[in-house]
Image (spheres, helix red, strand yellow):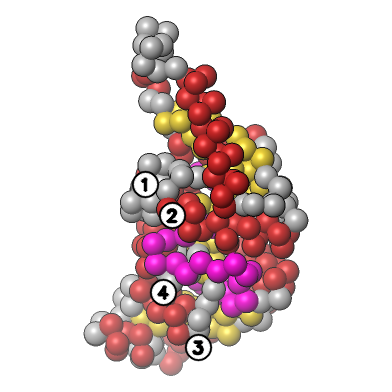
Amino acid sequence: MKFRNILFPVDFSEESRRIAPAVRAFQSHFAARLTLFYVVDVPESWRDVAEQCAGVLNLPILRRLCRERLRQFAAECFPGSPYEIAEGEGSPGHGICEYADRNRIDLIMMAAHGHGLIRSTLGSVTTKVLHRAGCPVIAFGAEARIGEKMPARILYGLDPFEEADALTRAGSLARELGATLSAVYAIPDFAGTPEEQYERKRLSGPAEKKLQERIAKLQGEAGVSASVELAGGEVENVIAETARRQSAEMIVLGCGHVHGILGGIRSHVAPVIRAAPCPVMVL
């Protein structure tokens, strides 16, 4: 799994600056083309009166100022690295995905906690990109550790009932990076305290055996052999705690399945990113 065209949406916040080292690491490892991108957030209704409001809303000037700020940002955060800059206008989430589609972007890297373009919580822009993007997205939550090296330990959020494709891609990424790959399956229906939920699986023998058989079949289909933990509790808490215990440097989530614990990816991805101690890649 290789990335040739990386898109980095920035909002000039401290969060954008904080994740720049990780973006540089991916750019360098894959010798990828890097595009720094900003969207001038212009509501659609404003366009209808743009000519009447030319003194207040001058889009050509705004775009020129954005390009200047992007160059300043690049000089500060990517000194000596090749990069391109681009800007758009309209809805930020839509603009990011539209640009990625048009320009064959194969990886989007973005802060999920910031100000302006990326909200102070996992907001509408990040959520829209995660749901709409046609390529993998790496999101950096507020708790994510940022390193200047590529991840050496990857944790996969497993859904035993998903298709094998996502797990195959996670395995391919781990091999490309020379990283170890482990997996965790969170079962949210266990009763008891969080400690009891995490420490004890509380599955009957036959049920656990059937689940292990399903996981083994999925790994066989994916061509992946990874150690798998089963744990009870809320999905985001289980994944985040497992990542901490294993010192994982990246969490990978698949596309989800309507019957699995991540199917539901639209309902679980945002909480996982918020709780994660490391970046989260959504395939």
User: Is 164 situated left or right of 242 in this image?
Assistant: right
Magenta highlight range: 132-158
| Image coordinates for residue 207, horizontal then vertical, percent | 44, 85
**Mark toward the start of the polypeptide (1 vs 2):** 2
- Please say whether residue 144 is one of the residues in the magenta stretch: yes
Across and down, in percent, residue 172 comes to 70, 68
| Residue 190 vs residue 57, the one in the foreground | 57
Disc ID at residue 36: none
Badge 1 amino acid: His
- Residue 209 shows which numbered tag? 3
Residue type (three-letter) at the residue carrying disc 3: Lys
Whole-number angstrom distance, CA of label 4 to CA of label 3? 25 Å
> What residue sits right under mark 1 in the picture?
115
Q: Between label 4 and label 3, give the one nearer the viewer.
A: 4
Secondary structure beneath dot 1 equals loop
Give the residue pinned by disc 4: 240
| Residue type at tag 4 | Ala
